[in-house]
Every structure is written in C-alpha cells, then in structure tokens.
Amino acid sequence: MAKRPESDTFMDMFGRFGRDLKLPNVDVEAILNHHRKNLEALEKSARASAAGASSLLSRQREMLQDTLHEIADMAQSYRAPGDPRELMAKQAAFARKSFETALKNAGEVAELARKSGTESVEILRERIKEAMEEIRSSYDKK
C-alpha cells in the first residue's frame, strides 16, 4: 500500500481548486501592487488627518490664550464703579464681546475641521477611483 501524505497545505488545496475550476493565472504582483497603492493612500490620508488635527489644536490653543489674555486685561482694568449702571454696562459689553468672539472662533474651528476632513476623504476618493480604473482595465485585457 502506498503512503499518502498526511495532509495537503492550504496552498496545495487552493492551487488544486483553481486548476479544477480552470481559473486563469493570477497575477500576484499586480494584486500586491494594487494593495500597496491602497495602503499608501490610507497612510497619506492619515497623515493629512493628523496634520489637520495638529493645526486645529494649535489654533484652539491660540484662541484660548487670546481669551485668557483678554480676561486678564479686563480684570486688571476693572475698578468698582460707584454707579451700578456703569458696572452693568461694562459687564454687558464684556458678555457681548465674549459671545461674538466665541461665535467667530467656533466658525473658524468648524472650517478648519471641514478642510482637514475634506482633504483626507479626497485622498481616499481618488484612490478608489484609481482602483476602479485598474479593475476595469484588467477586465478589458481579458
């Protein structure tokens, strides 16, 4: 009685399956190149996101420093006025200025976040478009 090998490897089984189905030869190098481009696009997108997050955090830090500086200036120049209407007018002016600054800063932060996200997504969108073209051209060759 002839001795059979104990078990086939996965690659042996996959190869036999492909031969039995008469599948065309697979261009492994093309597949690896395709996935390499996908990974490069993901890396580029992650770098763009990180750069956007970094600039966003930097800008938020600047905004906080400006706000704290304004509060310190106001506290230093604050003198208790004798007239309660004058005190209320100063407080109202400070509240209005704080609100306007907060709105302006929120808009700027939102714009920075939008730009960062758009750049990151655009990199991936471009890669998807290229990948679809690669797939179409590989089918056109056959």
Image (cartoon, rainbow, N blue to C red):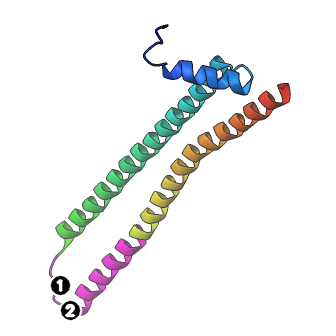
Counting from the top left corner in percent of width and height, residue 139 is at 80, 31
Counting from the top left corner in percent of width and height, residue 128 is at 66, 40
Tell me the kind of residue under disc 1.
Answer: Pro
Farthest residue, direction top: 2
- Highlighted magenta segment, given as a residue range: 79-101
Spatial separation of the CA atoms under disc 1 and disc 2: 7 Å
Residue bearing the label numbered 2? 84
Tell me the kind of residue under disc 2.
Answer: Pro
Q: Quadrant of the C terminus?
A: top right
Residue 132 placement, left or right of 90: right
Number of residue marks: 2
Contact, mark 1 vs mark 2 (Cβ under 8 Å):
yes
Residue 24 placement, left or right of 105: right
Tag 1's secondary structure? loop
Q: Can you say whether 67 is above or below 5 in the image?
A: below
Identify which residue is drawn at 42% across, 46% down.
53
Residue 92 vs residue 25, the one in the foreground = 25
Residue 72 vs residue 2, the one in the foreground = 2
Counting from the top left corner in percent of width and height, residue 118 is at 58, 50
Q: Main secondary structure of the magenta part?
A: helix
**Quarter occupied by residue 86:** bottom left
Residue 5 vs residue 56, the one in the foreground = 5
Q: Which mark, residue 81?
A: 1
Identify which residue is drawn at 25% across, 61% down.
68
Q: Quick check: can you spot residue 33?
A: no
Counting from the top left corner in percent of width and height, residue 106 is at 44, 64
Tag 2's secondary structure? helix
Identify which residue is drawn at 74% across, 33% down.
135
Crowding near the residue tagged with mark 1, few <14, some 14–19, many ≥20 C-alpha atoms within 10 Å? few
Q: Quick check: can you spot residue 48?
A: yes
Crowding near the residue tagged with mark 2, few <14, some 14–19, many ≥20 C-alpha atoms within 10 Å? few
**Quarter occupied by residue 23:** top right
